[in-house]
Amino acid sequence: MHFKSGKPRRTPSVIIVSLIDVLLVVLIFLMVSTTAKKEPPPVLKLALPESKHARPGATDSPMLVVSVATNPPYLWLGDKPITYERLQEELIAAARKDPKVVLTIKADKRAPFGEVVRVIDAAKTAQVGAINAMTERPSP
């Protein structure tokens, strides 16, 4: 049986199929662009040494973080590589600006110990207020 309505069917003024195609293209574009906006990986990955007696550091003094990597460039101030000479200049300037400035050394456990000693020497030469070492708590 074939049922017909009494009215002739008219074609829609807006073609739905092409609108669906456009929406799919926009959806694909949004999916690709939002996955590309992910946070970049950290510049320097360090495996910090473990310490059972580590405590969280809370200080009111300004803090400089120097990272010591396992491969050249060994020294990083914040998230930028730095030479030893430039590190000395930065530490001297920071100590002059605030004598209570705190230097935190974030060294990989496989980093050359000589580089860590050079950072400590530079901090003592610059008369930095305090020198701390960043560690991790051992996993249970």
Image: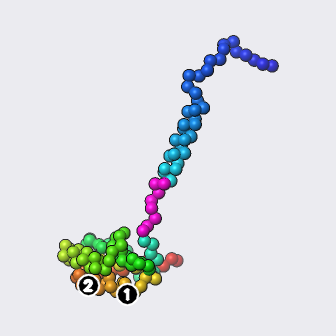
Q: Amino acid at mark 2?
A: Lys
Q: Classify mark 2: residues with Cα within 10 Å, few (<14), some (14-19) or many (20+).
A: some
Q: Amino acid at mark 1?
A: Gly
Residue 66, numbered circle: none
- The answer to whether the residue labelled 2 contacts the one labelled 1, judged by CB atoms less than 8 Å apart, is no
Depth check, front residue: 102 or 16: 16
Q: Classify mark 1: residues with Cα within 10 Å, few (<14), some (14-19) or many (20+).
A: few
Depth check, front residue: 52 or 19: 19
Could you tell me if residue 44 is visible in this image? yes
- Span highlighted in magenta in the image: 36-43
Disc 2 versus disc 1: distance between alpha carbons?
15 Å
Q: Residue at x 36, y 84 (%)?
A: 116
Q: Is residue 70 magenta?
A: no
Residue 114, numbered circle: 1
Q: In screen coordinates, is 103 left or right of 9? A: left
Q: Residue at x 45, y 62 (%)?
A: 40
Q: Residue pushed farthest left?
A: 96
SS for dot 2: helix
The overriding secondary structure of the stretch rendered in magenta is: loop
Q: Is residue 40 magenta?
A: yes
Mark sitting earlier along the chain (2/1): 1
* Rendered image quadrant of residue 122: bottom left
Q: Residue at x 44, y 75 (%)?
A: 46
Q: Residue pushed farthest top?
A: 6
Q: Which residue is mark 2?
A: 124
Depth check, front residue: 74 or 7: 74
